[in-house]
Amino acid sequence: MKFFQLILKNPFRNKIRSILAIIGIAIGIATIVALGIITEG
């Protein structure tokens, strides 16, 4: 149970790191989608 509490509390302690991680994931997904669209046509 402590593992889940750590997962829930940790992002709020490091807000900047969490925001950067979310931005990085969003950029990665957008890049994959864009490459898929470009290669199809």
Image (spheres, grey):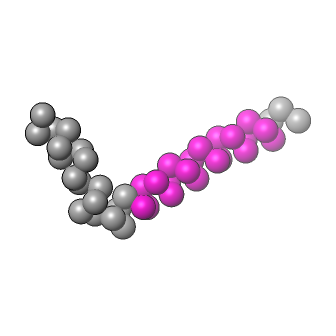
Q: Is residue 16 left or right of residue 26?
A: left
User: Image point 23% across, 54% down: which residue?
Assistant: 10
Compared to 21, does 2 lie above or below?
above
Residue 8 at x, y percent in the picture: 25, 47
Q: Is residue 37 left or right of residue 5?
A: right
User: Image point 55% across, 50% down: which residue?
Assistant: 26
Residue 25 at x, y percent in the picture: 50, 49
Residue 7 at x, y percent in the picture: 24, 45
Q: Is residue 6 left or right of residue 31?
A: left
Which quarter of the figure has residue 4?
top left
Majority secondary structure of the magenta segment? helix
- The segment highlighted magenta reads 19-38
Residue at the farthest bottom position: 16
Q: Is residue 12 left or right of residue 6?
A: right
Q: Nearer the viewer, residue 24 or 1?
A: 1
Compared to 21, does 39 lie above or below?
above
User: Image point 65% across, 47% down: which residue?
Assistant: 31
Which corner quadrant holds the C terminus?
Answer: top right
Which corner quadrant holds the N terminus?
Answer: top left
